[in-house]
Amino acid sequence: MKEPITTVPVLDLTPQALDNLVEELRAYHAIYSPLFQRREQREGAATYLHGLLLDLPRKSIEPMILALEGPNAKAVRTTQLFISEGAWDDEGLLHRHWQEVDTSLGEDDGVLTLDGSDFLKQGRESVGVKRQYCGEVGKRANCQAGVFLGYASRKGYTLLDRRLYLPQEWVEDEAYAERRRRCGVPADTPFKTKPTLGGEMIQAVHHANTLRACWVTCDEAFGRDTRLLDHIDGLGLWYVAEVPHDTHVWRQRPATAVPPWSGQGRKPTCTRVLAGEAQLEEVAQLAAALPADRWTPHTIKEGSKGPLVAHFAALRVIAVREGLPGPEVWLVLRRNLLTGELKTYLSNAPIDTPLATLVWLSGMRWPIETCFEDGKQYVGMGDYEVRGWRGWHHHMTLCILAHFFLVRVCLGLKKKLRG
């Protein structure tokens, strides 16, 4: 067995010692306060950040204000307006946040991680709410669906950006027009798939050029979208994307041509794979047919999940694009030695990429899942009671900043212990 491959260190982000960190929180808030145009906005952000970091069973606005200021109806209303209607710039805060992430966590081979997180909701009035698959409970439920971008390196992990997914009927159905208006959905908002939203976030971080990263990982919900994979490739980034077992590839590039005209009907214009060429195969079939000597055992340290022992293999294949041969990519196969579970990935990594690097990247998705767990447990990510478009994005922005504050504190404590 080879030496265990360490992915990302686990960060103990519990905010129990916050009472001793008020000055640090004030200094952290000062990084972002110049981005708020008005004093009331700066004060609102400081209050909300502090509230998200309190040790409370639920972090909606009323219990946060009660803990910070006592029974104060005016402060509750002021904070509600700050989150729901405040005209402050989320994007500016997030762009500044990416700079801070690079300072604390940035590495040249940093990993951008794309994933979804859903939020159970009651009623029909919250923006984007619908009965749909909800990852939080593992079945269909009334929920809002968020798409998030995270970052991970050998130093730690955090969240970078967020988008609210609007189901197609919410955007295009006239029956939803009044709900869109009440929720403040911008009139020109088009329908976008979750992979499209993810691609926009990756592009925004990449074009900002303030956070070092060269890899992207995602689960099969995103990895099956070839337009997203080509978009990532076009940005000059390398992806290791989990794909469904029935994903088709060619072992060798088949010859293609426009079929000759038979002399009748329209002349063919579309390129096709020539008859007699290699057939498409499912990636799970390739894994089953791979001889034992092509598999290598590795142990991955996947954070709080503990070590994972698996067999890995990687081979070059030809991806499919609209029924035709596309780019040559890596097919990465991972089979759990204890459960037999197979995971399949496609990657546009260079041909000389070591297997150990692909193994490492296959274990780099857990940090964003941990961010969701920590975010919902410690910084009230799912405790919001706002219903509108602006309020959802404001809340998630400040949750991202609160989470990263805990990351910074944890890193600082580790440095002191090493010192």
Image (cartoon, helix red, strand yellow):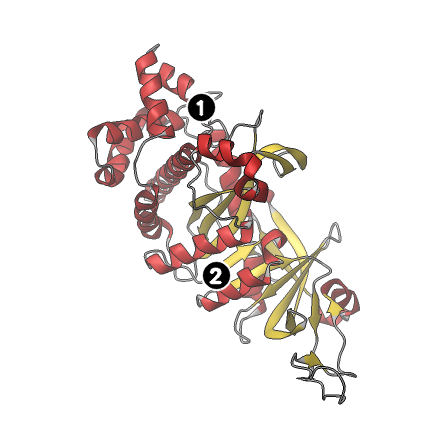
Q: Tell me the crowding category of disc 2: few under 14, some 14 to 19, or many 20 or more residues within 10 angstroms, Cα based.
A: many
Q: Is residue 356 above or below residue 267?
A: above
Residue depicted at x 72% and y 65%? 283
Give coordinates of residue 8: x percent, y percent.
49, 50
Q: Amino acid at mark 1?
A: Lys
Tell me, yes or no, if residue 278 can be seen here: yes
Q: Which element carries disc 1, helix, strand or loop?
A: loop
Residue 95 rendering spot, x and y as whole percentages: 32, 49
Q: Earlier in the sequence, mark 1 or mark 2?
A: 1
Q: Quadrant of the N terminus?
A: bottom right
Question: According to the image, label 1 marks what residue?
Answer: 59
Q: Secondary structure at mark 2?
A: strand
Name the residue that disc number 2 marks.
215
Q: Quadrant of the C terminus?
A: top left
Counting from the top left corner in percent of width and height, residue 133 is at 65, 39
- When the figure is inspected, residue 410 is found, relative to residue 323, above or below; the finding is above
363 shown above or below 393? below
Are circles 1 and 2 on residues that touch, CB within 8 Å?
no
In this orientation, which residue lies closer to the viewer: 131 or 207?
A: 131
Task: Indicate the position of residue 200 as horizontal and vertical percent values.
Answer: 45, 54
| Residue type, numbered disc 2 | Trp
Residue, far top? 71
Mark 1 Cα-neighbour bin, 10 Å: few <14, some 14–19, many ≥20: many
* 153 displayed left or right of 90: right
User: Which residue is at 29% across, 27% downward?
Assistant: 44
Q: Between residues 120 and 290, which one lies in front from this camera angle?
A: 120
